[in-house]
Image: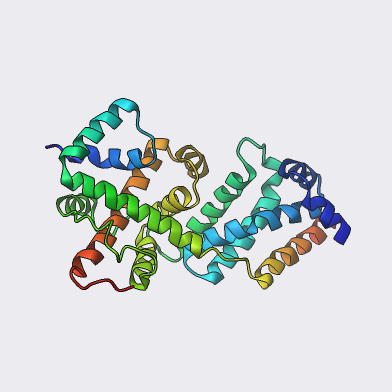
Amino acid sequence: MEQKSKALAVLKENELIERAKNKDHAAFEELVKRNQARIYNLGLKLLGNKEDAADLLQETFINAYYALPKFEGKSAFSTWLYRIATNNAFMKMRKKKIPLVRFESDRDASEQKNFTDVPDWSNDPRAHLKNEELKILLEKSVDALPGKYKTIFVLHDIEGFSTEEISKMLDLSVPAVKSRIHRSRMFLRDKLSQYFQSHAGHGAKL
Amino acid sequence: MKCEKYLELISLYLDKELDQMLIDDLEEHLSLCARCLALFHTMEKTVSLSRTYYKQRHCKVPRNVSSQIFYHLRIIYKKEKF
């Protein structure tokens, strides 16, 4: 068994997928090993706690095991897994009554505010990750994004997926993905701007 | 000045998803409008802070969590045999 896993570890992903489709369980388990950290970390970002991230990880790979015969290789295996994982994450958010698309304030009010009041804090010495307050605020603000916006922001700006890949993953048009990326960024930028405005003149808290 | 029309372009500009005509238009506007330039800089900073923050927080899958997946998969394999 040990030798078999060593041999599998050097195989390319598409070879593992073919083997796994032919019920080679060790090959499927190698795919789990290679991808589990990405899915677990995605769960932490989207759901905000270890228990839900662990559940999401397990459900995603069990769903993937059953769905693998239908995987045609039109997208990368990781993109396909992310599609399963994000669908599972949306179900969990719905169960917890986390809003998926509704912002805490309405669109016009939020964008008007963003636009009339724009201090440039980008060179403020506190705009740094050594600033613990800022880190907490950043995480809280990402968590405050509606579920689908948070997911798109994480997939694009953190995980580095393209708008086309996200559009396929979430069954949304590319313009809808772009617009949600923009709105998420405006929302987060506004939250950070409020922090820098309310702490204006307090000096660096590093 | 119609700043509103440049809002979404700023995001697309950050992602290098604008064609040259719109880049020229936006860059000209940014050179004249301090508010939009501030918005561009702070949006860019928001994205870079978020990216770095979550990269730093990347963690390994706890061993017991990983074992649970393999445990459940083996139950499924057994069920499939019968």
Relative height, residue A100 to residue B68 (above, below): above
Q: Where is residue A31 in the image (x, y as percent from the top left)?
A: 71, 52
Q: Where is residue A183 in the image (x, y as percent from the top left)?
A: 31, 49
Res. A1 visible in picture: no
Identify the residue shown where x is 37% and y is 59%.
Answer: A99
Q: In this view, does A41 lie to the left or right of A16?
A: left
Determine which quarter of the picture holds residue A4. Answer: bottom right
Quadrant location of the C terminus of chain A in the rendered image: bottom left
Res. A148 visible in picture: yes
Q: Nearer the viewer, residue A50 or A120?
A: A120
Q: Which of A59 and B18 is in front in this view?
A: B18
Residue sitting at the far left = B1
Q: Is residue A156 left or right of residue B39?
A: right
Q: Where is residue A129 in the image (x, y as percent from the top left)?
A: 39, 65
Identify the residue shown where x is 21% and y is 73%.
Answer: A202
Quadrant location of the N terminus of chain A in the rendered image: bottom right
Identify the residue shown where x is 11% and y is 37%.
Answer: B1
